Amino acid sequence: MAAAKVPVQRDLLSRLAAGTAGVVGAPFLRRLVAELGAALDAEVAFVAELVDERPGYARTIAGACAPGIELREGCELALEGTPCEHADACELLRVPENARERYPRDAFLAAHKLNGYIALALRGADGRAIGHIAIVSTRRLELTDEELAALQIFAARAGAEVERRRHEAALRAQTDEVAGSRAGALQAADEERRRIGRELHDGAQQRLVGLERGLGGALAALAVQSPVPLRIVSLPARRLPPVVEATVWLLVRESLSNAIKHAQATDVRVEVVQHGRTLVAEIVDDGVGGARGDHGTGLQALAARVESLGGRLMVDSPPGEGTRLAATIPLAPWRTARDPFLEFGHADDGGRGRKKIEELLAGKRTTAVSLAREWELEGGPPRIGQRLPVFDHMGRRHAVVEVERVALVPFGDVDPATIDPEPGVDDWHGGRRLAYDACREEMAALLGDPGWRLTDKDPMVILWYRRVDQTTAAEISGSTL
């Protein structure tokens, strides 16, 4: 006797539940569309969110396509004349077949001979449409009531994930905007203090002015004048924004003063380290401890200053065990013309940045392509003959190069044949899009443009360079990579 057929509803629901278990955010959406496409034998499944800053457009956040069909994440789609336009206006759009005939203006349907189309609107907590999830097939696409019920369950979950994503992006943009405005005010205040210092020849202000010499020089000057040994354990290889350098200097000066006057310390240690887009400054003494961050105008003022930069100041001072001050300051909104540099890689690049640096050190990579808007934050593209330090995304310095040629080209017109080839990479533009999408939120914060996304029209700076530092690739690779 043949075994009873398992209901389709249970198969689809179980498959979606098992395939998306244990993941949230973007990984959940990617898993969901992959499982939907496979379960329903559909060539295309995707999730798109409405673009608030561009009414009439949606942006894909996750997609799964059969070979030969491409629908990149981050692609913006015009809704007019497409099924997506109706999907966002109703709870459920069902076009089992003849979708091309019903929507003759939809170039995507026509190009891939797609026939069946089913979409569900994604809604936020207030009931407002925020996007849609769609399944598209070259064949007739009809779902049973049980299948639709299962799909609606996961569409509700997808809507919650999209709304969470949008809230997080809005919060990050707001935080960066506040940090940027506060930092601008601090920068202006610091410039005014330097002006007053020059006019009044005040000793303390003159030492602050010494930060044009760099943080290392300013701290060295403090160490020379201190009756207690001040040990500088580590500093970032590159210059920091002026207001950040001034904040770290003031933090060290206040800590040193407290160690001398109150803590009976015999040693003070300073360590300033850049971890990606975050700076951590630690000052530790071996004194009597007992310091409190909520007492004393000096530490309170420093805490307020660090917080105004979007950072945080921690004070750890157990009685009898010394005092440790740790300031964490985000660097994402900062870029200045004072210290231009080349940077390779980002936190989620799977080691590609490291590989590019290794190729540069070995003499196999002599070009760099980056967004022109990034260089605008540093005073414009570098000049021929200018020397640039090379950093990884963690702020570690690896080499120095000299610019030999500069070109400004729209992203869509960049010819991969004119730059260093990347073995195994057939779609250079697609790879770069994915790379910028992976760090899009960080780039948006850096550029001060919450809605930024790479387009074919975005100007790119192509640099041809030669390495000029004398350190060998093996030495640098062995010590810093």
Image: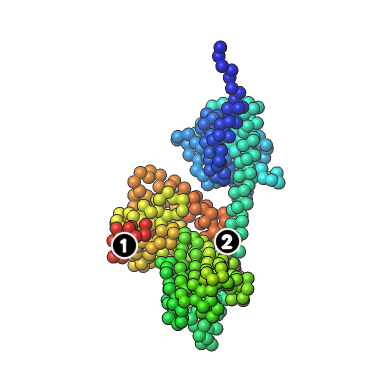
The residue under label 1 is 467
At mark 2, the secondary structure is: helix
Q: Position of residue 45 (x, y in %)?
A: 54, 36
Q: Is residue 476 above or below residue 141?
A: below
Name above or below for residue 254 compared with residue 12. Answer: below
Instruction: Between residue 404 and residue 33, name the one nearer to us.
Output: 33
Q: Tell me the crowding category of disc 1: few under 14, some 14 to 19, or many 20 or more residues within 10 angstroms, Cα based.
A: many
Query: Residue visible at 58% across and 72% down?
Result: 291
- Which quadrant of the view contains residue 476? bottom left
Quarter of the picture holding the N terminus: top right
Real-space Cα separation, disc 1 to disc 2, in angstroms = 35 Å
Which residue is at 52% across, 47% downward?
74
Where is residue 167 drawn, in percent x and y? 62, 52
Q: Residue furthest top?
A: 1
Query: Which residue position holds label 2?
Result: 176
What x and y, as percent, mark residue 19?
A: 54, 35
For image coordinates 49% across by 72% down, the residue present is: 286
In the visual, does 360 lie left or right of 244? Answer: left
Which mark is drawn over residue 169? none
Q: Amino acid at mark 2?
A: Asp
Q: Is residue 270 above or below residue 34?
A: below
